[in-house]
Amino acid sequence: MLRDLLAIAVKRVVIVARQLAQGGAERQIVALARALRARGADVHLLLFYPGGVYDAEAVSAGVVLHCLDKTGRWDTIGFLWRFASTMRRLQPAVVYSFLDLPNILAALVWRHAGQPRLIWSIRAAGMEMRHYDWLSRVLPWIEARLSRRADITIANSHAGLAWATARGFPREQLQVIENGIDTRHFSRDTKGRNRLRALWGVPADAWVVGLAARIDPMKDHPGFLRACALQVAAGANLHIVCVGDGEPAYRRETADLANALGLAGRVVWAGARQDMPAVHSAFDIACSASAFGEGFSNAIGEAMACGTPCVVTDVGDSARIVGDLGELAPARDVQALADALARMQQRVQQEPDLGQRARQRIETQFSLERMVSRTEMLLFERQ
């Protein structure tokens, strides 16, 4: 009892996640943890796997990391014992878990943690699970069945809230808190732009259209490449850059498609990168071509914060993020996406302040401060 009261008094929150690997959700976790720590909360990150790219950043901000050292998918009994034991020892006031498996496990060990306030986070919308393996398909089903155990489930998009409701999550426990973009970090990087365009061999007169996303069926790189090929066939001087990694076989298949479309000399496969402000600044147009699954796309918000206008498919909350400052196409409509790219190229030439206005939209509508303040209020409202 004394430990529980102490945890509440110092606002101890345990954030549960698989790993701090490179990704949109992981950036949000670290940004939130750092900000809550700066506001006086006792923040602990409980991670399944070690070696995340953001581990050091979290520790440097005073966030305490606990790694359960999961060795793989089938490390279950020992892992669950370590999970429950760590939660019993920490006795947090609040547990905030991210994504399906952490949500499920946080609900299952809730009593061991002293019955804290339990908050879930869901980040996707309208997932098409047929593209993934059987375990990836069953986890969302289990998550939905356990959803009433959470005090609050936070969706990072309005589309995510609607999808959760359709899956059986109790509507009265759902809240939307959109992602927050750190505009101090994500800002125009002219030196980085010049460095990367030189590295990528971009001709001085070329337009760089970039897609920053993992190479996954959800992100629809094939549709993006086909749309770019249509633009090239129409005479556009495009240089295409894909930033992100993915499953090797699918990467090879996607690269083979680019070659078949005649884009081999125009496409750079840049892999995963840490210098994302420079990446977004190097693009003349940033594209999100997702076919399904998006909630709130960090890549769109980050590109806009760097002053790069966006062409997006109408998936998740992408249209809401860009507003009238971006160009929109239906998902999986290659011709419409090609036309949207052409319209954006014209707008960039005709509206020299378009990038500046895009950044201002992120600063006013989707700031990091807004996300942190709203999350803090939900996490600790009972106290």
Image (cartoon, rainbow, N blue to C red):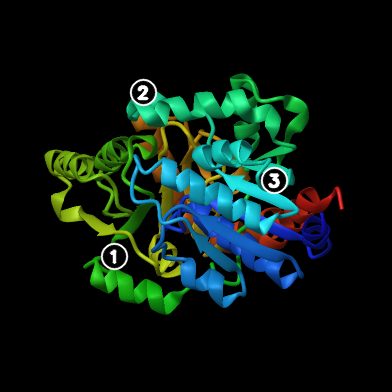
Q: Distance between the residues labelled 2 and 3?
A: 28 Å
Verify CB contact (< 8 Å) between mark 2 and mark 1. Answer: no
Query: Which mark is in front, 2 or 1?
Result: 2
Up-down: is 305 above or below 57?
A: above
Q: Nearer the viewer, residue 204 or 216?
A: 216
Q: Nearer the viewer, residue 249 or 232?
A: 249
Sequence-first tag of 2 and 3: 2
Residue neighbourhood size for the residue with mark 2, other residues' Cα within 10 Å, grouped as few (<14), some (14–19), many (≥20)? few
Place of residue 172 in the rendered image (x, y in percent of width and height, measured from the top left): 78, 28
Quadrant of the image occupied by residue 9: bottom right
Up-down: is 198 above or below 238?
A: below
Quadrant of the image occupied by residue 191: bottom left
Up-down: is 36 above or below 85?
A: below
Sequence-first tag of 2 and 1: 2
Place of residue 119 in the rendered image (x, y in percent of width and height, measured from the top left): 69, 43
Place of residue 230 in the rendered image (x, y in percent of width and height, measured from the top left): 27, 38
* Residue pointed to by mark 1: 205
SS state under label 3: loop
Verify CB contact (< 8 Å) between mark 1 and mark 3. Answer: no
* Amino acid at dot 3: Ile
* Residue pointed to by mark 3: 177
* Residue pointed to by mark 2: 130
Q: Which of 80 and 262 is in front in this view?
A: 80
* Quadrant into which the N terminus falls: bottom right
